[in-house]
């Protein structure tokens, strides 16, 4: 667990100067006294992908933003996800669903199996995590939402989303840190006692319907068990968390960019200034990392742009003080609506050409992913390593070629990068694994001691030694 | 190969005429030389019976006679009976017996189910010429304190069918020869039933010997409905010989394995329109006939069937991954078994689909259903608070009520707690508390029956009573206690979810009366049963299909049914999408966000008029010659406004308009560029229930914008005529040709922004058809679509999916076809469709899991 206290400055790092308050940090950090870091696993997704030919350029190309973290990460090329193909649907949906699950989807909001973070969670916390830990945190900055699998990247064994998406920094903040005040919960002892009794009675009902004599089938019992966990979380927040002290920090500011259905007008895309996009994303990334730092979150996923994201981005893009590009998707494409979105640069990709716009966008995507990874790397656990090093962090995306022209190519060479997970995996290299994502994921799960495996039970497992330390 | 009760396939039960769903054990006393009484169930582990003293019995043809006192006991304890009864709280024991010796003074035990020798769970006894059944519950004394249920009347000579049933509410019945003879109540649960020993011809302790003959003994883990008891009576006491009960394995394979396999792996190249190699595998006749290379299938002989040979060698599917070994084996078994073909044609419906599967997911009330349920149960309108507090539902697989996606977050639970407190504060609880305001449990039961949509069990009453007692001991009033109990009920799974008996034997069981009442009310109203429907459930009358139909028709006369139908059409066509339209302001400077509101109103009002005021068949949604427009929308459509506000417009004289596809709601699906691909795919997927494959390898799929001299239609035609694209694009892009004159926002024009002249002629290749049908105008296209059974089938499927709250699976296809035919015969209106769905097995039955 953590030993270093979080400074406000750290949290404000990515918030673009917006004052973000933090609740009860000292109190949260008191719990972090164990010498051994908790088991943690996070899936980090970014939309649109990196065409496989560009990955071969290593850190000299679009992977450049990952160079500062090179000794903490292992970049995996030539990872094949063809089995995730769902006939008749391009890879935005099924490639996205296959990230971290390696299985084709079972529905628009249902993956073909559990995601790797959830397999680890079930292994290490079969009876649940401590009461003040959010079981799974799913957050992200994204806009396209026609199918849930485009943006949610943590899934239960039955393929349903492991947690609801928190798409605004304020929502994520509330989900992790928010206190709950039930009616009459404060200042009326008798009413508060009664309200607790009400929840006790309710809990008893849920226990029956999740127990051995429940009339419900397995999936339904799991659904109600999830509901029961949320009730217990409610109880903890409403009755056991300490009241706020005077002068406690405030909620993050309201989001200034589009959310909900308005962010996805029928797949036509929306206009977006780069600074607005990255400011919100970094605030989201900061808050997520903070939740990890104070040990409120151990599992989940974070998404930077949905699969098949459609944005018309404008603004100067610089990296390390060096101007990389000037984004002006609509102007450069001389189009409007969906045709003017940066998404189209992926459709236009030509391996033999320079593809400057795609390169710039992909570079920017990885700069933002690296931002989140750095936040994790700044968290020091008691063993002297960072949360990035101690956790199983997996970065992936939707495709290895965004042209929708060939499933074999589109779902092959899907970019991956993984952290060392406590020294289990190599770092500091770029490896051409030449293997199915299923074998990569299962190698990771095996190495970390997870009890579950992904994919068909009768499939022969191929261990990928190239990733093992 | 399986026998009685082996699968959910109705055809298997038909073979014997007996009810098979929920069957746990069945003994027909047919001697096989082993001396054992064989359990004829195969889907659950059979447990045979052993005769204690073989000299005390005599085997006859199809019966076993007890000639002297002895016991016949199960060779192993039957966990399967206790497992089912414990979770269902239900049981049916059916015995066909002759009484050869009766002693009016002696109570003899025909059969017993016991945990051991001292704990009897169930007994069927005979005394004189009457029968008594005892069933042990949590409320009866432990040991031999089983609750006396009912006494029965006189039996006739010969084999008598004696049936005891108990449902989960405690309603218990004895039927003699198919007729209800006695009814009573045995409250409590069977939660502590354990592995059960079945004893025949004596009590568990061996003190109540019985003499007579047994012809048939069956135990079900659910209560059979009266009609089912009568059906078993009709079937008689003799099971058909095993071979007669066997369904054609080939037919079963076809339904469950082969049709989905052919649909997903073969029809892309071998359907009626493509017919590569001259082979059409969609219909039996054409499949048997084969293609250019001869017979594809020779029933009974896979080794002489080209289909098998090509698949076996890996030559087919061509240029695609071969079938797996298990898939190949299925195909071979099916052909060798006779190549049964149970459908007129196979197509997209048979394809295993994303999101398909009749998985049993408990259904959480959607936000809208929650509000309506609170309003109906308590008269409290929480719509404003719920809108703020409850997370919005997320659309999945076409609808927002897809059960698997109705997950729960902390925000839900917090909202439920706060909304429950608000509702409890505002509810009128006086009617529940009743006279004297006493803290007894009668009002808890009354409140539970209303709020939780059915009677409470003893297990449920206790905690609520304790809660009320706590209020009392802390000085609270009865009124306060009632509100606290109500608050707890409103957060309980019985309220927030539609709890059903999902555990069973893997077959579909008839929904319990209260389950069925809720199913019906949520299908028709999106809310809970009203008093009349609840009373029908209470009385048991809902077990009759005619009563179900009557109730559904009654409910369809209620305004809530209209609201529910608008929810359906709104979700199907995703009218909520309109609120998010943000067309390019340079290309569409005249766009006003209010137009999106008008378009939504147009579609909903149009549907309401057609479905409810005119009561027209729903396929007329495609070609009805009227609509509802505001002046602003009328101008947008190029029509002269007829007055202020939303008004009905007669479109008979407007050739460009008429029907859903000419409304802004659907014309905007193609985006600013009015994409023919997107529009065509919408028609193919959402109106014609068709599918196309992925683009072929190596193709640049970037949309090509229109330009001077090159209209969208011309670009689409290039794709259709291209060798690389035409195979698939010819299936859907021509469907959008007729809409070319509508721009991305639904305005009508003859010339596009580049000066290209636009057309409205085209052709429709209906999925499954061999040849396309041409049309010359928008009106003709709408007429073709309205007349198409594919469109009508799609409407049936969409409404059925919305009703059951899950994507349809290939296994639903027989039910869908029955619904479709029944609704079509009745007139194909919304009412007809809902009635057919509500009276189908999709609603009447609950799929259980073992």
Image (tube, coloured by chain):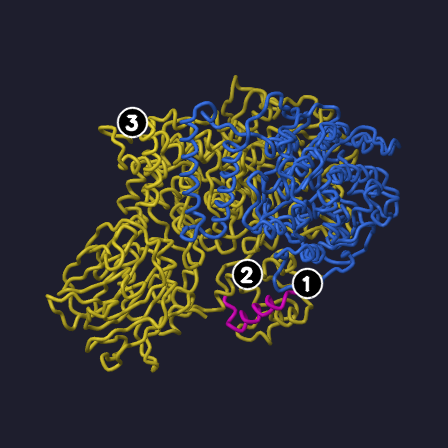
Chain colours: A blue, B yellow
Residue at x 56%, y 51% (from the top left corner) = A126
A63 or A377: nearer the eye? Answer: A377
Can residue A305 be seen?
Answer: no
Which one is earlier in the sequence, the residue at label 3 or at label 2? 2
Same subunit, labels 3 and 2: the answer reads yes
Q: Position of residue B266 (x, y in %)?
A: 62, 61
SS label for mark 3: helix
Asked if disc 3 and disc 2 are in contact, CB closer than 8 Å, the reply is no
**Span highlighted in magenta in the image:** B322-340
Between disc 1 and disc 2, the foreground one is 1
Q: Position of residue A157 (x, y in %)?
A: 57, 51
In this picture, residue A257 sits left or right of residue A128: right
Residue at x 63%, y 66% (from the top left corner) = B324
Q: Chain of mark 3?
A: B
Same subunit, labels 1 and 2: the answer reads no
Which numbered disc covers residue B15? none
Q: Which residue is mark 1?
A: A461
Question: Residue A465 magenta-drawn?
Answer: no
Which numbered disc covers residue B430? 3
How many numbered badges does the structure rendering display?
Answer: 3
A219 or B673: nearer the eye? Answer: A219
Residue at x 54%, y 38% (from the top left corner) = B409
Q: Identify the main secondary structure in magenta.
A: helix
When the figure is inspected, residue A379 is found, relative to residue A409, above or below; the finding is above
Question: Residue B334 magenta-drawn?
Answer: yes
Q: CA distance from mark 3 to mark 2?
A: 59 Å
When the figure is inspected, residue A408 is found, relative to residue B414, above or below; the finding is below
Q: Which residue is mark 2?
A: B259
- Packing grade of label 3 (10 A; few <14, some 14-19, many >=20) is few
When the figure is inspected, residue B691 is found, relative to residue B621, above or below; the finding is below
SS label for mark 2: helix
- Packing grade of label 2 (10 A; few <14, some 14-19, many >=20) is many
């Amino acid at each position: 667990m953590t030993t270093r206290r979080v400074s406000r400055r750290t949290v404000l790092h990515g918030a673009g100067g917006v004052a973000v308050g933090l609740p009860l940090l000292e109190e949260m950090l008191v719990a972090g006294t164990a010498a051994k870091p908790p088991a943690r696993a996070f899936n980090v997704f970014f939309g649109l992908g990196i065409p496989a030919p560009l990955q071969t350029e290593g850190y000299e190309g679009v992977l450049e933003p990952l160079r500062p973290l090179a000794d903490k990460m292992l970049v995996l090329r030539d990872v094949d996800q063809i089995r995730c193909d769902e006939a008749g649907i391009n890879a935005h949906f099924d490639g996205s669903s296959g990230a971290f699950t390696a299985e084709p989807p079972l529905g628009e909001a249902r993956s073909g199996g559990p995601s790797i973070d959830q397999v680890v969670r079930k292994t290490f916390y079969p009876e649940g995590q401590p009461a003040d830990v959010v079981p799974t945190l799913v957050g992200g900055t994204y806009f396209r939402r026609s199918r849930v699998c485009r943006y949610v990247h943590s899934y239960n064994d039955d393929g349903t989303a492991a947690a609801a998406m928190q798409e605004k920094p304020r929502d994520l903040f509330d989900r992790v840190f928010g206190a709950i005040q039930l009616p009459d919960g404060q200042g009326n002892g008798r009413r508060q006692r009664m309200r607790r009794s009400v929840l006790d009675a309710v809990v008893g009902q849920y226990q029956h319907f999740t127990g051995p004599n429940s009339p419900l089938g397995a999936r339904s019992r799991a659904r109600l068990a999830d509901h029961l966990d949320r009730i217990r979380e409610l109880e903890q927040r409403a009755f056991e968390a300490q009241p706020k002290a005077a002068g406690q920090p405030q909620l993050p500011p309201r989001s200034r960019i589009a959310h909900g259905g308005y962010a996805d007008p029928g797949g036509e895309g929306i206009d977006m200034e780069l600074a607005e996009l990255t400011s919100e994303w970094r605030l989201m990334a900061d808050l997520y990392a903070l939740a990890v730092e104070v040990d409120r979150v151990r599992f989940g996923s974070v998404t930077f742009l949905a699969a098949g994201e459609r944005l018309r981005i404008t603004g100067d893009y610089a990296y390390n003080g060096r101007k990389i590009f000037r984004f002006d998707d609509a102007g450069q494409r001389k189009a409007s609506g969906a045709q003017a979105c940066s998404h189209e640069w992926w459709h236009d990709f030509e391996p033999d050409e320079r593809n400057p716009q795609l390169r710039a966008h992909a570079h920017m995507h990885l700069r933002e992913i690296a931002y989140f990874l750095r936040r994790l790397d700044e968290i020091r656990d008691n063993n002297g390593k960072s949360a990035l090093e101690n956790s199983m962090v997996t970065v992936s995306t939707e495709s290895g070629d965004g042209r929708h022209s060939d499933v074999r190519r589109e779902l092959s060479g899907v970019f991956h990068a993984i952290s060392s997970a406590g020294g289990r995996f190599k770092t500091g290299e770029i490896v051409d694994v030449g293997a199915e994502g299923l074998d990569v994921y299962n190698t990771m799960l095996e190495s970390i001691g997870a009890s579950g495996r992904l994919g068909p039970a009768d499939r022969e497992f191929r261990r990928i030694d190239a990733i093992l330390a | 190969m399986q026998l009685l009760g082996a699968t959910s396939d109705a055809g298997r039960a038909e073979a014997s005429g007996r009810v098979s769903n929920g069957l746990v054990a069945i003994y027909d006393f047919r001697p096989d030389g082993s001396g054992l009484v064989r359990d004829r169930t195969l889907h659950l582990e059979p447990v045979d019976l052993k005769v204690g003293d073989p000299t005390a019995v005599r085997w006859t043809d199809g019966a076993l006679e007890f000639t002297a006192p002895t016991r016949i006991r199960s060779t192993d304890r039957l966990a399967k009976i206790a497992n089912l009864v414990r979770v269902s709280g239900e049981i049916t024991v059916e015995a066909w017996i002759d009484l050869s010796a009766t002693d009016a003074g002696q109570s003899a035990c025909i059969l017993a189910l016991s945990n051991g020798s001292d704990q009897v769970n169930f007994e069927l006894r005979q005394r004189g010429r009457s029968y008594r059944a005892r069933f042990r519950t949590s409320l009866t004394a432990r040991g031999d304190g089983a609750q006396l249920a009912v006494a029965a009347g006189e039996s006739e000579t010969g084999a008598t069918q004696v049936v005891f049933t108990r449902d989960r509410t405690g309603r218990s019945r004895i039927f003699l020869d198919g007729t209800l003879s006695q009814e009573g109540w045995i409250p409590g649960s069977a939660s502590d039933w354990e592995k059960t020993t079945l004893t025949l011809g004596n009590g568990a302790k061996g003190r109540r010997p019985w003499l007579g003959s047994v012809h048939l003994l069956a135990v079900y883990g659910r209560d059979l409905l009266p009609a089912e008891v009568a059906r078993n009576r009709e079937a008689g006491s003799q099971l058909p010989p095993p071979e007669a009960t066997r369904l054609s394995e080939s037919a079963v394979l076809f339904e469950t394995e082969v049709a989905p396999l052919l649909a997903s792996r073969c029809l892309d190249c071998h359907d009626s329109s493509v017919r590569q190699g001259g082979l059409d595998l969609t219909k039996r006749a054409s499949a048997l006939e084969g293609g250019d290379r001869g017979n594809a299938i020779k029933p009974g002989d896979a080794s002489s069937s080209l289909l098998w040979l090509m698949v076996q060698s890996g030559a087919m599917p061509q240029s695609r991954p071969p079938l797996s070994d298990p898939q190949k084996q299925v195909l071979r078994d099916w052909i060798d078994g006779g190549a049964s073909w149970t459908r007129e044609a196979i197509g997209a419906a048979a394809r295993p689909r994303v999101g398909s599967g009749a998985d049993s997911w408990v259904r959480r009330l959607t936000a809208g259903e929650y509000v309506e349920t609170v309003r109906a149960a308590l008269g409290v309108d929480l719509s404003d608070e719920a809108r703020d507090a409850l997370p919005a539902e997320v659309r999945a697989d076409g609808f927002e009520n897809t059960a698997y996606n109705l997950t729960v977050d902390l925000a839900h639970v917090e909202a439920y707690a706060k909304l429950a407190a608000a509702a409890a504060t505002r509810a009128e609880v006086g009617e529940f508390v009743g006279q004297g305001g006493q803290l007894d449990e009668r009002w808890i039961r009354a409140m539970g029956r209303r709020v939780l949509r059915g009677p409470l069990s003893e297990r449920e009453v206790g905690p609520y009573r304790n809660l009320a007692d706590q209020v009392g001991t802390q000085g609270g009033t009865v009124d306060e206690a009632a509100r606290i109990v109500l608050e707890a009920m409103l957060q309980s799974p019985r309220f927030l979810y539609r709890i059903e008996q999902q555990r069973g034997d893997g077959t579909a069981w008839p929904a319990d009366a209260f389950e069925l009442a809720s199913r019906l009310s949520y299908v028709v109203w999106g809310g809970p049963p009203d008093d009349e429907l609840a009373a029908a459930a209470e009385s048991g009358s809902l077990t009759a299909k005619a009563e179900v139909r009557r109730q559904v028709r009654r409910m369809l006369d209620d305004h809530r049914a209209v609201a529910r139908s608008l929810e359906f059409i709104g979700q199907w066509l995703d009218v909520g999408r309109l609120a998010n339209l943000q067309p390019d302001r340079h290309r569409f400077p005249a766009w006003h966000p209010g137009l999106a509101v008008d378009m939504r109103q147009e579609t909903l009002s149009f549907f309401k008029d057609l479905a409810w005021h005119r009561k027209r068949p729903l396929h007329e949604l495609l070609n009805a010659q009227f609509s509802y427009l505001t002046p602003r929308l009328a101008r947008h459509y190029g029509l002269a406004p007829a007055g202020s506000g939303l008004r009905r417009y007669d479109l008979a004289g407007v050739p460009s308009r008429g029907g859903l596809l000419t409304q802004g709601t659907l014309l905007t699906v193609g985006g600013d560029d009015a994409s023919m691909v997107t529009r065509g795919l919408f028609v193919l997927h959402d109106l014609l229930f068709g599918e196309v494959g992925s683009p072929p390898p190596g193709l640049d799929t970037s949309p090509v914008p229109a330009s001077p001299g090159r209209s969208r239609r011309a670009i689409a035609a290039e794709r259709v005529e291209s060798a690389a694209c035409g195979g698939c694009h010819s299936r859907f892009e021509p469907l959008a040709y007729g809409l070319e004159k509508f721009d991305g926002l639904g305005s009508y024009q003859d010339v596009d922004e580049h000066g290209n002249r636009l057309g409205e002629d085209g052709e429709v290749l209906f999925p499954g058809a061999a040849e396309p049908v041409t049309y010359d105008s928008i009106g003709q296209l709408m007429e073709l679509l309205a007349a198409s059974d594919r469109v009508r089938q799609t409407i049936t499927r969409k409404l059925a999916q919305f009703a059951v709250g899950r994507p349809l699976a290939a296994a639903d296809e027989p039910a869908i076809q029955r619904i479709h035919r029944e609704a079509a015969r009745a007139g194909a209106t919304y009412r007809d469709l809902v009635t057919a769905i509500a009276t189908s097995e999709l609603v009447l039955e609950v799929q259980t899991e073992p």
